[in-house]
Image (tube, grey):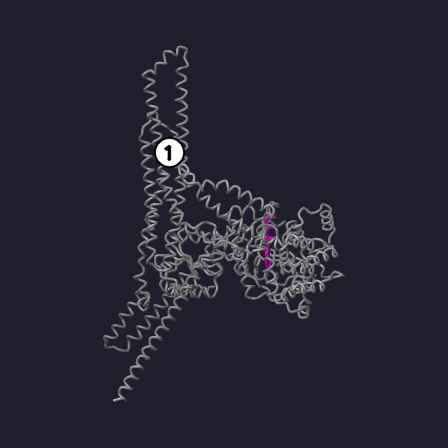
Amino acid sequence: MNVVLAVKQYVSKMIEDSGPGMKVLLMDKETTSVVSMVYMQSEILQKEVYLFEHIDSSNRESMKHLKAICFLRPTKENVEYLIKELRRPKYSIYFLYFSNVISKSDVKSLAEADEQEVVSEVQEFYGDYIAVNPHVFSLNIVGCYQGRSWDPVQLSRVTQGLTALLLSLKKCPMIRYQLSSDMAKRLAEGVKQVITKEYELFDFRRTEVPPLLLILDRSDDAITPLLNQWTYQAMVHELLGINNNRIDLSRVPGISKDLKEVVLSAENDEFYANNMYLNFGEIGTNIKNLMEDFQRKKPKEQQKLESISDMKAFVENYPQFKKMSGTVSKHVTVVGELSRLVSERHLMEVSEVEQELACQSDHSNALQNVKRLLQNQRLSELDATRLVMLYALHYERHSSNALPGLLADLRTRGVSEKYRRLVSTVVEYGGKRVRGSDLFSPKDAVAITKQFFKGLKGVENVYTQHQPFLLETLDQLIKGKLKDNLYPYLGPNTLRDRPQDIIVFMVGGATYEEAFTVYNLNRTTPGVRIVLGGTTIHNTKSFLEEVNAAGFHGRSSESSQAAPRSSVRR
Amino acid sequence: MATRRLTEAFLLLRNNAAQNRHILAEQVSNVSSRPGSARSPGAELDELADDRMALVSGLSLDPEAAIGVTKRLPPKWVDGVEEIQYDVTRIKQKMKDLASLHDKHLNRPTLDDSTEEEHAIEITTQEITQMFHRCQRSVKSLQSRARNCTEQEERLLRNVMSSLAQSLQDLSTNFRHTQSGYLKRMKNREERSKHFFDTSVPLMDDGEDHTLYDRGFTDDQLVLVEQNTLMVEEREREIRQIVQSISDLNEIFRELAGMVVEQGTVLDRIDYNVEQSCVKTEEGLKHLQKAEQYQKKNRKMLVILILFVLVIVLVVVLIGVKLK
């Protein structure tokens, strides 16, 4: 269950199958991202793939000495481009690979277009998702909501992505979904439909315990994407934004030219791989060690290469040294920028209050803290708004709810109209009426005692108290205690044993905090393998964008829509 | 990693499509040839065209296809690339040979101390170094050919070069590692032999009646010492040679390093490079459009100027005519 490896194997197989000789890789925009997440250019160049092109770029020259490997999504536009390409082939021979199930009629029209008989392979390779980490995938879709239902275009895209994932991992799962979300149900049904339709594809060797696909909705836990993060990967995404493992640093003051954009990929950056799940303090120490290590090696290089043994040592260590210097400067820049942002935006204080809002239920204290921070003029607009959002989500039904007062505070601070309106939109999106389960106050005795003991012990780290709701869900699922009435099975069969291979998909986007949680679960629970996916991977900004794009139009229209659903919920 | 092969279905569909086309073409030719029973030269020509069509399936009607045929020849540098790749495989083979020679020399020393093995090692080392040199030169010469080709070809060539440079660099690092490893082991052995040599001397004047030995070594011992010195010299020469080859490689290495893209940076991302090339072509297009505009403007100016001059000339003529 390693998604990075799965996609990488697909790409490697494509290249191997085409035999020796110079090759060009034709892709569309999405498959370009898919391939770039698993292969670096230098790596793929070694396999004699020397040119990378978009299928839609119009001015490709004819190069008959190249073989073309086309890796495309089977969309209408791509098929049209391919038809055009095959009528006037620019390369000597074509290997066509589609990232998903392609319709018979499309194959036919391609066959008719291939008058010069240049196509030698047509295959479906199901690499139709972005493999972020070995246990995390994304589809890079922001804006799948239309109110509370799917944007139909996105629904079919997400269904395709999810089925491709199942095929690439060779899993034919049982499906469970979150009952309170209509979208989760629709998606579950869509996936099931594909599985039934393409039953011969999903005919894998049966395992003792069938794998499980759990489909959840982001609206059940709107808290997690609103929190500031302190583990490396999550923090970088929250403060700088990770886009396909690329980080745009061009806005950092005084950045040097070759660090304007950097790549953080666990695949070929050892330091990152070792530190992506560590918290900010630990990273500081590790960076320091890295620097010292580097300093120790550095003087050798700066000395004049006088004796032959100097020269020899230099040449032997040079590649390693060069790589190290790149890594060091990259991480020092990133961490430097993070710590600059932390101090500039007072993120320590903000995060402490955030965590308190998310994890404790002391209303008066929380309100006081939020009010105090709102007085601080150096707080950024976004941070001020998210505090109020967290407050609004937690104490939505509290008897002495002071939300109007806080909103007024926001106005006097000069927070823009857009952000202030988002507060109510977020409550609309993830408020109590929508949630199928209770985020904040535990219900059963076990959970209450657990929390009580936690309170007694005190917290180790105030900034990382919060555990995403997903942890509880997965914990119950692994123990076989997840309630069937809240997360029903699709179809008549139910799983008797504890699940082993679990694929969790979050409609509306997962977060890196959840990725971290899943990573820990994978590590600590033997025999259980979990892969987490989402329509995208959110930070607060993108999450607010998503909520905003969902387009809730005030309470009045929504309440009429929500009424029938509340009866479904329980 | 599930896959599904659609090649058979595709081939079937393609053959069907080809047959359909064929039948259609035949029908058309039948229809066209029937009405004129007396064969006019025009009809014959038509038939000829039809024949050709059937043979190369409509290729000849396509003006670009004709160009395509001539373009099928790959650019010349492709041969160079193949040569380099061949050399790289040969270097790999030689390095394997060398490694086994090293092992043999170090682990199974023969008593007669024949120089044959050493000689073989020397030759192989030199050959490898030479081959590295040659490869590096040919990679560099590829660079010079990049000047007179199109933008896309240049990109291709650049990628080819960086990949070749990469593999050469890896190989040379490897080679250097084996060389220095060998060197180290040789030095160890030498030290060990020195150790023997040193201890053998005190052993000799350890005797009680050392006045006898004070006058010098016996002839046997002298021979031994001479032999040892010879051996040490020989070893030193070997070591110097290896060091020399390392320093030779050093130069190659530095030049190659310029061509290799640093791994793990954004420059090494496929999507970044594709985006970049798109941006570049767009820019190029913009430049072209701008240039065209300028040209048009220029033409307009030219026309205006000519008209202006014409008007003046005509006015002068008019005045001249009027004055007369």
Q: Position of residue B54 (x, y in %)?
A: 31, 67
Which residue reaches farthest right? A399
Residue span colored magenta: A505-520
Give the structural element (helix, strand or loop) at label 1.
helix
Looking at the image, which residue is at 56% across and 47% down?
Answer: A275
Q: Position of residue B155 (x, y in %)?
A: 39, 57
Which residue reaches farthest front? B323
Which quadrant would the C terminus of chain A be assigned to in this image?
bottom right
- Magenta includes A510? yes
Q: Position of residue A335 (x, y in %)?
A: 56, 50
Count of number-bearing discs: 1
Q: Quadrant of residue B281?
A: bottom left
- Magenta includes A326? no
Q: Position of residue A368 (x, y in %)?
A: 73, 57
Describe residue A199's horizontal placement relative to residue B319 as left or right: right
Q: Residue under mark 1: which chain is it in?
A: B
Q: Which residue is the site of mark 1?
A: B102
The three-letter code of the residue at mark 1 reads His
